[in-house]
Image (spheres, grey):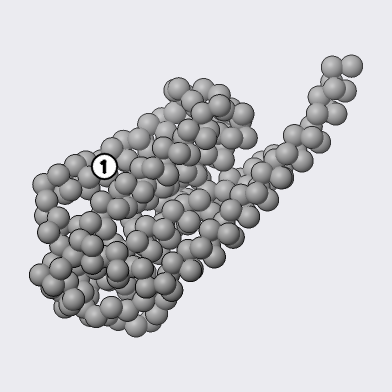
């Protein structure tokens, strides 16, 4: 009788999971259209001028921005990622709610998000705002959509790699949610907040435009739910 009850519950659980994935896809589609609207609004340059002048960005070499918000945050991000990997075998805190296969899925999804950002950034010809002539550099402004046109700068500035130190951990939300963890939404909120703060701090230094940060957030979210869904499918956990 008990086994029959679980069989009855399984289809409902699968239906709820499929509904969640469709909702995640809808979030990706809607946010993509909003992101494209920002991309073509001209807001990037207007926002960069909040902090940048013709002689550069005053906060570019600020000790707090460099040592704490950039180098310190990057180190903290790598340490937290290492803690998640260790948590596969020795689960801690919220990871205790997940089976080992789900902990592996969680880590792979986070790593997939980081890898996606790294690969795109490595291929990008887009330079940073501080490289532009209007901010004291030598490069001319070229949209990141012009993927084959060189701007005369160093390139490799799109999307925002530093923001992924926070945004990539959004990918873990999907494994936490399907496990029924009460902390899943809090995790998502913290990752979103961390990525936003780190992204804006780099914009203030002239390292990125707002679109770079927004694209990083979108990619980390989308890669997160897609990789989690794919791994669940491969495991037969649809």
Q: Position of residue 138 (x, y in %)?
A: 16, 78
**Residue in the picture at 26% in, 65% down:** 48
- In the picture, measured across the screen, residue 222 lies left or right of residue 47, that is right
Residue 165 visible in rendering: no
Residue at the image point whose x is 25% and y is 55% from the top: 202
Quadrant including the C terminus: top right
In the rendered image, the vertical position of residue 94 relative to residue 46, given as above or below: above
Residue 70 picture location, percent across and down: 22, 48
Q: Quadrant of residue 179?
A: top right
Q: Residues within 10 Å of mark 1 (few under 14, many from 20)?
A: some
Residue at the image point whose x is 23% and y is 67% from the top: 49
Taking the spot 41% from the left edge, 47% from the top edge, the residue there is: 167
Toward the top, the furthest residue is 1
Judged from this view, the residue extending furthest toward the bottom is 149
Q: Is residue 1 visible?
A: yes
Q: Position of residue 223 (x, y in %)?
A: 52, 53
Mark 1 element type = helix
Depth check: 134 or 152 in front?
134
Does residue 230 lie above or below 34 as drawn? above
Q: Position of residue 160 (x, y in %)?
A: 34, 58
Q: Quadrant of the N terminus?
A: top right
Between 136 and 90, which is closer to the camera in this rendering?
Answer: 136
Q: How many numbered dots are placed on residues in this image?
A: 1
Above or below 168: residue 84: above
Pointer 1 residue: 73
């Amino acid at each position: 009788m008990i086994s029959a009850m679980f069989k009855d519950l399984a289809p409902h659980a699968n239906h709820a999971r499929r509904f969640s994935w469709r909702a995640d896809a809808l979030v990706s589609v809607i946010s993509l259209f909003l992101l494209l609207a920002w991309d073509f609004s001209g807001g990037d340059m207007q926002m960069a001028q909040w902090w940048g002048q013709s002689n550069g960005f005053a906060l570019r070499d600020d000790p707090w921005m460099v040592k704490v918000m950039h180098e310190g945050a990057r180190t903290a991000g790598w340490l937290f990622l290492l803690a998640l990997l260790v948590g596969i075998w020795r689960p801690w805190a919220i990871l205790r709610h997940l089976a080992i296969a789900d902990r592996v899925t969680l880590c792979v999804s986070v790593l997939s998000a980081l890898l996606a950002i790294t690969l795109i950034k490595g291929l990008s010809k887009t330079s940073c705002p501080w490289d532009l002539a209007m901010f004291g550099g030598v490069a001319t402004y070229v949209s990141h959509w012009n993927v084959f046109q060189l701007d005369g700068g160093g390139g490799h500035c799109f999307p925002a790699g530093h923001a992924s130190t926070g945004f990539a951990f959004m990918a873990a939300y999907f494994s936490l949610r399907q496990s029924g963890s009460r902390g899943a939404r809090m995790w998502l909120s913290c990752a979103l907040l961390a990525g936003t703060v780190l992204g804006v701090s780099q914009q203030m230094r002239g390292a990125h435009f707002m679109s770079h940060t927004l694209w990083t957030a979108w990619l980390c979210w989308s890669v997160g739910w897609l990789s989690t869904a794919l791994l669940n499918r491969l495991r037969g956990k649809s």
